[in-house]
Amino acid sequence: MNSVNGQFLMSMLIIMLGYICKRLNIVKEKDGEALARVVINITLPCLIITTFSTLKIEFSLLKLTLISFIYGISITVIGLYLFRNKKRKAKGVLLMLLPAFNIGLFAYPLVEAIWGHEGVKYFGMFDLGNSFIIFGLCYIIASYFSSEAEKVDVKETFSKVFKSIPLCTYIVVVFINVLGLQFPRIVTDFCSIISKANMPMSLLILGIYLSFSFDLNYFKDIASVLALRYIIGFTVGILFFIFSPFDKMVKYTLLIGFILPIASAIIPFSVEFNYDQKLIGVLSNMTVLISFLLVWVLVGII
């Protein structure tokens, strides 16, 4: 079994372990909330520090960061228009699911197996823009639409955003990286140990919220999110691949990057702001399966 298939199999087994533990009543869905808070506030920031402390930001590849960021803003604007008639909370959850990609848990293992560390560097720069979409834009959406009140305190919303530990961690890490500084060895060693728990815990949370049945009223919303993510993402990726003047690895990054699954951080956000975790869990798992198949088809073709 090659490393990519092995990584995928292990991920599926961990998800199923979380689901089985829930079915056997070893854990309950409400336990997922505590795990989500640990992931978002402890293991994920440690993963950010570990990943970006060894990643040298190359200014020649900042186009990947900028394209990723602009894409996230653009598809959110499209979503705002298409979902304009949805109820406030329904609009919030659908908008959260559109712009962000699961790169840390899903893409890095696949990319390293296919293109090695060179590929990880390119996807790391793509992830930089994606990270500000996740911990900035998606967090703002989650906070803003969580209240049913028509008038929401914008100052309070942005205050919550800048209290986001992952976002603050990203800002600090990028600032230190750009200045050419480094974290003390004891910090990176400590974070490296803690970050190893991020993947299994995130996958367990997916399993705990996994459901093979859903309200038929969700069908239209699920179809809308999947269609927008994959039709727009695939179209934009193909256009960059065919018409952009970029080198091949940049083209591969954009082609693959825009069809990756929903960001795993959305689940902790949904817990924090009391959104529908079952809907998000169903869509997260569906996009993992769809993206895995699409990535393999594209890699086989290109």
Image: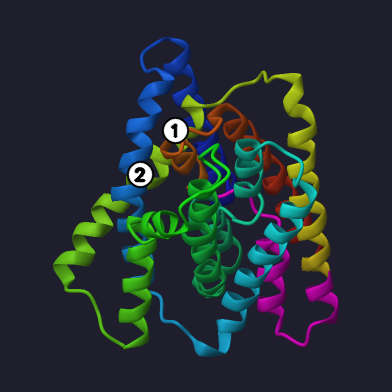
Upstream in the sequence, badge 1 or badge 2? 2
The kind of residue on which mark 1 rests is Ile
Reply above or below: 287 against 76: above
Numbered mark located on residue 205 in the image: 1
Q: Tell me if 95 is positioned left or right of 18 in this view.
A: right
Q: Residue furthest top?
A: 24
Which stretch did the figure color magenta? 239-264
The one nearer the camera, 26 or 156, is: 156
Determine if residue 208 is in view: yes
Q: Name the quadrant of the C terminus.
A: bottom right
Q: Name the quadrant of the N terminus.
A: top right
Q: Tell me if 191 is positioned left or right of 263 in this view.
A: left
Circle 1 SS class: helix
Quarter-of-image position of residue 172: bottom left
Find disc 2 in the rendering and name its residue: 39
The one nearer the camera, 16 or 137, is: 137
Q: Are marks 1 and 2 in contact (CB under 8 Å)?
A: yes
Determine if residue 264 is in view: no
Quarter-of-image position of residue 197: top left
The kind of residue on which mark 2 rests is Val
Q: Whole-percent x and y of residue 87?
A: 68, 36
